[in-house]
Amino acid sequence: MRIINIRPSRPTVVVLALLPFVAIFIAYTVASDIRLAANPADKLLPAPETVMETAGRLVTEADRRSGDILFWQDTWASLQRLLLGVGISSAIGLVFGLLIGLLPVARALLAQVVAVISMIPPLALLPILFIVFGLGELSKVVLIVIGTLPFLIRDLSQRVLEVPQELVVKAQTLGASTWVIAVRVALPQLMPRLIQAVRLSLGPAWLFLIAAEAIAADAGLGYRIFLVRRYLAMDVILTYVMWITLLAFLMDWALRSLSRRTFPWAEDGL
């Protein structure tokens, strides 16, 4: 039997999925033990139990000055910025994706400028955004929008172009207007791709969020990481990094589940 034809069972899939994480944990534990054996005061690779103790303290203990649990305050601040930025980007991307993909005039007008804008490194615009929009929440949200919007527009417009032309022709034959074709023909084909595109844009969105918070913020996951780095508090940094990873995974899982439940016919296995 060829390897390409082997289909692992569900339990095997679970075991195979867990193996890389186990390997990473073992490698980290061994490296930490080696460094701590050479220097018990080493802060670069704290022991796993130290990280767990720090995580427990961060999620339960309130700040003495403010009385708030900073971990949850940072989480809420970052999630607000991320969800707002991705939500705005998704809405705008959906509209312009439909326009560019469905209307040749809009495609001729906008496709090239979107392609050019997508080549600009969003982080290079960060100083400009801070100058134009200030150091408040708006500049951080705008960075996420600018960073993810060109990709969404290009991806969604391409999906509209892939809609079978027979459907468009049949709709026009039956007297459908451009608006009806957009809403009844193109949009249903586009919605599952929108969810997949948002899933793919979550990684860059987190990157832009952390970068913006690291430079100008008074709360947020990225702000806290860059605040404690000067003290080499790797146990705190690792806790926040693992929490960000878990949040990103849960968001991706939620979007994947939504896609499977809402558009099972479009499921691609991602």
Image (cartoon, rainbow, N blue to C red):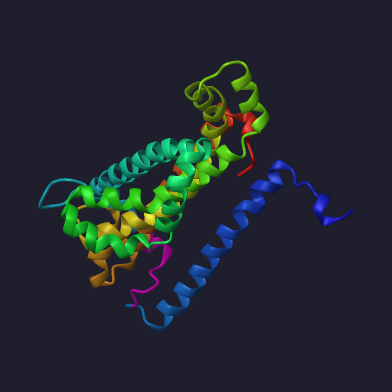
**Can residue 218 be seen by looking at this rendering?**
no
Q: Is residue 45 magenta?
A: yes
Residue depicted at x 54% and y 38%: 193
Q: Residue furthest top?
A: 174
Q: Residue furthest left?
A: 65
Q: Is residue 47 above or below residue 221?
A: below
Q: Is residue 61 above or below residue 188?
A: below
**Can residue 13 be seen by looking at this rendering?**
yes
Residue depicted at x 62% and y 35%: 163
Q: Position of residue 16 (x, y in %)?
A: 66, 53
When asked about the image quadrant of residue 204, the answer is bottom left
Q: Position of residue 153 (x, y in %)?
A: 45, 45
Q: Residue 188 or 227: which is nearer the viewer? A: 188
Q: Position of residue 83 (x, y in %)?
A: 34, 41
Going by the image, does 209 lie left or right of 36? left
Magenta stretch: give its range. Answer: 42-52
